[in-house]
Amino acid sequence: MATLTFLGAAQQVTGSCYLVECCGQKLLLECGLRQGEDQRGSEEYQLPPQVHPAAIDAVVISHAHLDHSGLVPLLVREGYNGPIYTTAATADLLPIMWHDAASLLRSDYERRNRRLRRAGKPELVPPFDSQDVEQALQQVEGIAYRQRQDVLPGIDLRFVDAGHILGSAIVELWLHGEKQPRKLVFSGDLGNSCAPLMNDPAVVEEADVLLLESTYGDRNHRDLDQTLDEFTEVLLEASQSSGNILIPAFAVGRTQDVIYHLGKLKRAGQLPRHRVFIDSPMAIRVSEVYERHQSLFNHDDPHFREFIKGGWDHWLPGLTYTATPEESMALNRVTEGAIVIAGSGMCTGGRILHHLKHNLWRSKTQVVITGYQARGSLGRLLVDGATSVRIFGDEIAVKARIHTLGGLSAHAGQDQLVEWARQFRKARPKLFLVHGEVEAMRALQNLFVSVHGWNAHMPVIGEKTLL
């Protein structure tokens, strides 16, 4: 008898983790990091208590974002030595994501331990390090889209394109138990059909059980053309006021989308004389991976297809990479004429914090929020209208203008989620809503029930169900 246990992203939007048990095998679907309020007083880097690493037989990861993959090195450190299945492109992104996480952990724990040493207290050990990352990478197996593979006795796996970021996948699992085989489909993070680089999410027509993300289950995105018009107005306003533009952006996906849009505006003569800086070593490396996997782009724009062959700076002339700390710090002395794209996308860490500290209090500064901001994050505080925020222990007045460009989201909006789910033709699968804040999930649940007569369950952490 096959079972499914919800261990993360159940009435939460981060920390995706689900345990599938079938034919005496245990498969961990996702092993993600909890972020923002989803930590709820606990450490980010902590496995769900129901996960016993040595007892897991296989791990499946839908895409590279840390809220789906970030605990895998910890899982390996604590005894998991089996295969880690993901797409081929995701396998190329994971070294960047995991090594960056290990580096941030090392720096964070060095700061903590300095305080502990001064207090005469025992030092702490980071949850994982670069050696654990290297071991985890040795266990990663990349699989091409649409290639069905036997991954465990009684369990087959196939990835199809989710259209969210490079390499993102909808996960199909066939479970061959004692009774009639069952098929579990996990949407992963479904992409926005207006995404400039990625394909639309692939159609899947058969499933017995469906796990559907609900990040934007309570709303649709703004029209892309209107969003780009607003973006153009922000650029013009910044040009007239001589201020800087700060764009917090996820290194994987969002940064590349922003470069694409800026390049398009540049070619249309609508980009003022601002210099564009990518101030994120990780985003720079990720962009190189994107260049290697151009075959996965949607190729809707023939001009982009031609120019990207020469690299991102060929598409956006004048694009500057600031890879070193010294180059990044030099940007803080620039008071006008700069467009700075930096991580983290939710302003919870990374170089964007330094730029916000130096620019938020300036009324000429424009801050452009281009993606989802989890509750408890600094980005969410800015979106919600905070008049002051604390950064590196200092109270910083928020006098900059904060803009939210919802149309650039890499997640499907409410209508897109429903339309994708309605493509299951032969029979409606048993539907579970995951990966969303409670309000968003409840709105999507009500829509499925009231409009489509389709019961949608909102599982809680630790809930177990028969498949």
Image (spheres, rainbow, N blue to C red):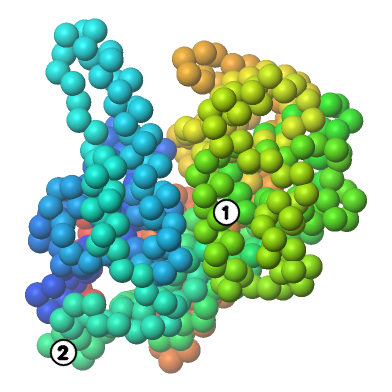
Q: Which amino acid does label 1 sit on?
A: Ser
| Residue 431 visible in the displayed image | no
Between 134 and 260, the one nearer to me in the picture: 134
Say what secondary structure mark 2 lies in: loop
**Residue most toward the front?**
310
Spatial separation of the CA atoms under disc 2 and disc 1: 46 Å
* Quarter of the image that includes the N terminus: bottom left
In this image, 308 relative to 255: left or right? Answer: right
The spot of residue 299 in percent (x, y) is 68, 73
Question: Which corner quadrant of the image does residue 41 belong to?
Answer: top left
Q: Residues within 10 Å of mark 2 (few under 14, many from 20)?
A: few
Q: What residue type is labelled 2?
A: Lys
In this image, 374 relative to 339: left or right? Answer: left
Q: Is residue 194 above or below residue 390?
A: below
Question: Which corner quadrant of the image does residue 416 belong to?
Answer: bottom right
Residue at image mark 2: 179
The spot of residue 95 in percent (x, y) is 38, 53
The spot of residue 413 in percent (x, y) is 59, 61
Q: How many marks?
A: 2
Residue at image mark 1: 287
Whichever of labels 2 and 1 marks the residue nearer the N terminus, that label is 2
| Residue 143 visible in the displayed image | yes
The dot on residue 166 is none
The spot of residue 459 in percent (x, y) is 31, 60
* Quarter of the image that includes the C terminus: bottom left
